[in-house]
Amino acid sequence: MGVCAESIHQLTIPTPFHVGPVHVYLICGDTITLVDTGPLTKEGKEVLISELKNFGYSIKDIEQVILTHHHPDHVGLAGLFGHATIIGHRYLRPWLTKDRAFLNGCIEFFQKFYNEHGVPMEVVEKVRRTSQAYISFIEQADLNVIVKHGDKVPGLSGWKVIEVPGHAQNHIMIIREHDHTAIGADVLLASISSNALLEAPMKGEERPKTLLQYRHSLQVVKELNIKKLYPGHGEIIYEVNELINQRLQGHLERARAIKTIITGDRMSANDISYELFMKKHTIQPDLTFSETFGHIDMLVERGEIQMKKEGNYFLFYNE
Ligand SMILES: [Zn+2]
């Protein structure tokens, strides 16, 4: 089958998460490819099977699965495709295999990190429970092929892999170069700003400054001049670079707002997050804390606020 005959179909799978349904993509190209899978839920599985059936395919017909990043709404059902080639970034592996030592390391990192930044113990415990529940929406699977930035997509001629870390450390997208069409998953969403989620560092690395990383990824995406971007949630995006500019501007505005919160007094990241989000901070503390901390990283990096360690705690101030 030639590249021109290749078609991309959007399948929409329900999720139990706040973000709503997730889009996964069926590419009828040289190789029958699925990009992402939906979460491990009974309903998710049923809808994936029936949506595939609408296009004349069954689970067994899928020859390869490309996983964009480790979040359960994207990879939860990868275990259904044991017969297929599963493709993703190397940092996706410990999540997908549910590597015990790795997952425990993440929990330990966050307990210490949240603690040092003034998050109360009961909130830390709440975050731990939420993330454990979150992982249960992934069925254990493994990668057969690891891809990196600039690689050709195996089995799909004319497609390239782009690494876009920030929302997740292992986030990749794929682009069909001849017509600038891309499947971006959560790198850019039309209706909501994609959160640069805090993550524990991978072995031997420093804590990733996820918002800075995400902003860099957005610049990389901008240079691709994408004409049509298929997202993980919401509407298909055509004005890609315009939206990227809006998002980059939005970060600067939020950073400015955070800077005004940090007056001369020394504040913990938890205090800052509470000021910024008020009640919401206690409902979804992991998301609000990521959002706050990303911008704190940005302000520190730009020398607009300062960080100081006092005893076991980190405090921020603005002189
Ligand atoms: Zn995601």
Image: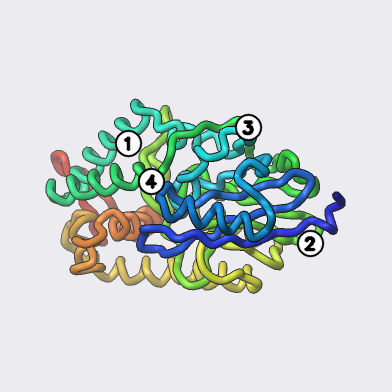
Q: Tag on residue 106?
A: 1
Report which residue position mark 4 lands on. Answer: 137
User: For the point 70% across and 59% down, which residue is it?
Assistant: 8
Callout 1, which amino acid? Cys
Q: Residues within 10 Å of mark 2 (few under 14, many from 20)?
A: few
Marked residue nearer the N-terminal end (3 or 2): 3
Where residue 175 sits, quadrant-wise, is: bottom right
* Residue 97 placement, left or right of 110: right
Q: Residues within 10 Å of mark 3 (few under 14, many from 20)?
A: some
Callout 3, which amino acid? Val
Report, in whole angstroms, how far the alpha carbon at label 3 lies from the one at label 1.
24 Å
Marked residue nearer the N-terminal end (2 or 4): 4
Q: Tag on residue 145?
A: 3
User: For the point 49% across and 71% down, which residue is it?
Assistant: 249
Report, in whole angstroms, how far the alpha carbon at label 4 lies from the one at label 3.
23 Å
Report, in whole angstroms, how far the alpha carbon at label 4 lies from the one at label 1.
17 Å
Number of numbered discs overlaid on the protein picture? 4
